[in-house]
Each structure stands twice: as structure tokens, then as C-alpha cells.
Amino acid sequence: MGVTVLLADDHPLTRAGLKAYLETEDTIELVGEASDGDMAWDLIRKLEPQVALLDIRMPGKDGVTVARMIKESTLPVAAIMLTSYDAQQYVLASLRAGARGFILKTATPEELSRAILTVAKGGLYLDSEVAQAVGEKEFLPEAISVREREVLLLAARGFSSKEVAGQLYISERTVQTHLASIYDKLGARNKTESLLLGLKYGVVTLEELIE
Amino acid sequence: MKRRLLLVLSLGVLLPTLTVLVVAGFGIFQHEWAMEKVARSYVEDLAQNMAYKLDQESPAWRRMFPYSMNLHGWGMSSLASSVPGWVAIVNSEGQLIYASSGAENLASIWTPDIPIGKAIEIRDEKGAKYTIAVIPTSENQYFVVAAVEWEQLLGPMVRFNHLWFILVLIMVLSSLVALIPLFKWVIVPLRSLVNEIGYLKWGKDKPEKDDPRAVSEIRSLRSVLYDLSRAAIERDQLRDSYVNDIVKIQEEEKARIARDIHDGPLQAVTAFIQQIRLFKITSARGKSNSGDHLHLAEEAANATVRELRELCDDLSPPWLELGLANALTEVSERLSRHLGIRVTVDVPEDIALPEEYILSFFRVFQEAVNNSFRHGVADSVSGKVYREGEYVVFQIQDNGKGFEPSPDFQKLRVEGHRGLANMKERLGLLNGDLAIESSPGEGAILTCRLPFVNIENK
């Protein structure tokens, strides 16, 4: 018995393609298809698939909303966002909403099944194209300090440098110094990247991020 | 060169005034001095004359002393009464020996510091002015005192002098007083107006509407400036709202195009890639259905082309250059297919219009049919084009549920119902107009009217 998957995509052609991808994999069992957000949410509650592949842009509820509803309902369903957009902010928004994976619709069948299997086992999967900015080569990051970790997590939750400074009782300048050091250690160019890299290298966990 | 009104006016008023004041003052003093000289020489002459007579008649005179009454015998009284003023004779002890009539008040004006031999002016306690001279006889035994009251001697001249002085003073004061309202009602309001206008952000601020201090000319100038600045503000606001609209429409258009590309060609190309990959996988595995994936890939590629073509047609319809009749027929058939309702159009072949007219009618038709479908829930829309005098008319009629047309297009625009407002403005750019006839339950008729321009004349 394979990993049960629900596929939600409003575009019939791409849905057919993705369905055909999933059918080539023995380890994956497609249990339902939805063409909009409302239908997806109904099927998720009814079928409780292990993994829900959710298109971000759908009529009715969008994918991010459905992911958030899954998180809030504490159903044992791992959401993977499926999209044509490769903006990193989408990735972050999806992860904050509780998605465990982010994959582009142009991903190969191998990538798709790897993503499904990874999140089904409780892991986190980010599309290699999105994660390209996030360093392709194998790279072992320098350990970040406890303080830097705190700064990174608060920044990840969307707090500004000033707000982070206020929460940690340090100066805004110090926050910026910490962030610069984090970027250096992880090889990131900005906050979003450092966060995605942090997730990738296991410096921070998804649970901490969506806390 | 700066023309300083206040300075010029002040100088123009003040300089002559001051000149008059100085000249008149000088004249008055000259006059006063001349009168003084006349009075002095008069009293000195009078006294000297008397003293001389006394010296001539000295022995007899002494013999007669102290019977002063007899002095008349020397013609004293005739002298004293025939000329203004009076004379008195006192001895060295200060005793009054003789006094002509009118000399009674010698005591009232007498002061010890009157010099001998030289006439001076003194005043009595009532303020009347006298010139008095004391001349001694040759042996200094007696002193002849002669005096004249100015009023008596020079009355009209003194009065004239005083009046003249007062007149000049009044003139000076009134010209000074006239400068005050000039400053308060003209200069100050003008300066404050200039100041306000100088710092005014045209199109944002307006000056004070009125300045009650100012003269009416400045007030009306201010009110004109106020009206102008208000018009500028309104014009700017209108322009801002138009620019806002344009920016908003641009962004909406971009968003719509992006959405169309995302939902259409992007998905179709993604599907195409997926089917190619599936073909590779299935054919590698030797599955019999691998050909299906190629077929699906072809379908996806076809869908991509179709969607891209639709997008292009929608952005800028290439068949507009086929002329009005073809363009409108094409769009009616497309809309009919797309919306699933009946759309017909009737255009006479002989009406040839410039391209911007065709585009205008085309967009209006597109918008109108979409409105009829979406808002009016019409299932049939028909259009017809005809000539009417100097105009070419395009009338579009639907069988929808109709509506209450609002005469205020600007209001419609502000409320976000830009469709009708856009149509009207679009026609307005070509000096045309749009009329709407509709009422609930009755369908709607749009009548577009453009001044007819034959394409050959363009």
C-alpha cells in the first residue's frame, strides 16, 4: 500500500499530467482529485490522505488557505504546495501556513515522488528550482550561536529588526550584526534565503518556524 | 526697477507738504519779524520824538513840573490821540509824570528788566502783545515810555499770520493722516496678498477669500485669485483622479494579462512538458500506451497556441484593419461563441471609417456585450451602424433585465463602474457621445454617435 495522495489543481491539462506522473509510481496511491479549493478541503476531511498536493492559485479557497486549515484542524495530512510561481516569499508564506513542501508544476516525476515520500515521512521538501538560490552544492554550514538562532527565528516570523531588538532586549544594531553573521555562515543573501537555508541545513526546524 | 508705491506716494505727499511747511514757516517768521521791526521802530520813534521835544522845551517844562496837565500845550495830546499806542513820562525815581490816554495799563505790563533805549516785546497777563520802548531825555532826568498793542497797530496782519500758520499745519497733518489709510488699506493688504501668493502651492492651497482691511480693488483682486486657485485645485484633483484611474487600469490590465498567461499558456506548456516526460518514462519501460502521451503533448501544445492567439487577439485585434463591417462581425461572432449567447451586428458595407473609429466602436461593442451578459443577463444582443446626418451612429440593444441609468458618469467612475464612463470618454475623445436608454425589465439601448469622417478625407 502506497502513500495516499490527494491532487488539487484547477487546470485540467496539468492535473492530468500530474495524475499520470503519480500513476507511474507504485509507492504512491492517488486517492482523490479536486479542481478547486473547496472541493479539496472536503476531500481532505473525507479521505484524510497522507499527502495533499495543493495548487496555490485555485478558484474558491486558494492552496495556502487550505494548508492553513489543515494545520488548524490538526488533521494528519501533510500539504505540499504546487505552483507555477517561484517567488521565495510564496515558499515562506506556504511554510508558515503549515505546508511541508513546495514544488513547481514543472518538476520531474522523480522530484514529485521524492517530495511526496519525504513529507509523508515527516520531512520537509523544497523544490530544487526554488532552492537553487539556496545553494545547490553540498555545503556544511558553520554552526550558528544560540543568540543568532533566536534572532533568525524571530526574523523568520516576520518581525522587523526593531521588533526583534525589542523582544531580545538588545539594540537594533546588534540584531543587524547577528543577521549579517547568520547570512555569512549560511551563505545567504537575505532574510528569506537564510531562513530557507536554515531549514534546509536543519539549523532551524519547521515547527519552530510556524510556532 | 522696483516701483515702491508707498515710497513714491509718501514722498509725493510729504515732500511738497514739508516744503510748504518750511517755506510757509519761514514766511511766517519773516512776517512776524517784519511786523516786530515795524512796531519797534514805531515805538522808538514815538518815544524819541517825545524825548526830543522834552529836551527842547526843557526849562519851561521843568517850570511847569509837576503840572502835567499843561503838557497838552505842547501838542502831546494831539500826538497821542492821532496815532495808535500811548506814551508816558516817568522821572528817574519811577514816578509817573505824564500818561496819555490808554497808558493806564502801563503798570500791568511793566517789568523791571525793560532795557533803556531799545524796543522790546512783552505780553500782559491776558496774553496781548505789546512793543515797548523806553528812551531817556538828554540829562537822564526823565524817561519817555512809548508802547503800542500789536492788535491795535497790526491787527489784521497778525490774524492773517495766525490763520496762515494754522492752515499750513492742518494741511501737513491731513496729508500725514491720509498716508495712514493708504498704508493700512492698500500697502499692508497688498503685501500680505503678495506674500500669500508667493508661498502658495498652486493646485494645493488657496489664499484667504477676503481681506476686510483692504480697499475694494484689492479685495476683488484677492477674490479673483481665490477663484483661480480654487479652479487650479479642482483641476489638479481631477487630473489626479484621472491619473489614478489610468494607473489603476494599467495595473489591472497587467494583472489580468498575467493571470490569463498563468491560467492559460503556462498551464498548457507545463502539461506539454509533463506529457513528454511521461512519454519518455513509458516508452523506456516499453509500455504500450506511451503513444497516448505524445498525443496528449500535441494537444497541450495546440492548446498553448490557441490560448496565446486568443490572448493576442484580445490585446490588439488584428482584424480591425479589415474595416468596420468585418471587425464588428468578427467580434460579434467571437463574443457569441465565447459567451454562448446570440450576438448579431448589422453594418452597411459602404461606411468606411478611420481606424481609431473602428477601434472605438469595437471596444464599446465588446464592453457593451460583456455588460449585457454579466449585469443584464441578456441572451441576445444586437448592434447596428447607420448614418444620421453628420453622424455615424452605432446602436446596441439587449434583452437583459435593464437598469436605471445614472446621468452622472463621473460618479459611476468614482464608484468603480468604469465601463460606461470609459465608453463615454473613449467616444468623447473623437468628439462623439454616448446615450443610454434603459429601465428595469426593459433591456438596454446604447447609442454611440461619432461625427462622420470619410476615410478618404482623412
Image (tube, coloured by chain):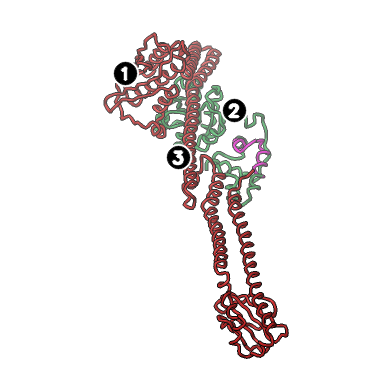
Q: Which residues are magenta?
A: A177-197
Write down the residue under mark 3: A72
Mark 2 surroundings within 10 Å by alpha-carbon count, few (fewer than 14), some (14 through 19), many (20 or more):
some
Write down the residue under mark 2: A128
Q: Out of B118 and B19, give the one closest to the viewer.
A: B118
- Label 1, label 3: how many angstroms apart (C-alpha)? 48 Å
Q: Which chain is red?
A: B
The residue type indicated by label 3 comes to: Glu
B131 left or right, relative to B438: right
Compared with A100, B21 (above or below) is below
The chain that hosts pointer 1 is B
Q: Quadrant of residue B100?
A: bottom right
Same chain, labels 1 and 3: no
The hue used for chain A is: green
A126 left or right, relative to B320: right
B108 left or right, relative to A143: left
Q: Of the residues under marks 3 and 2, which one precedes in the sequence?
A: 3
Q: Which mark is residue B242?
A: none
Mark whose residue sits in front, 1 or 3: 1
Q: Is residue A181 magenta?
A: yes
Write down the residue under mark 1: B380
Q: Quadrant of residue A43?
A: top left
The chain that hosts pointer 2 is A
Mark 3 surroundings within 10 Å by alpha-carbon count, few (fewer than 14), some (14 through 19), many (20 or more):
few
The residue type indicated by label 2 comes to: Ser
Q: Position of residue A7 (x, y in %)?
A: 46, 26
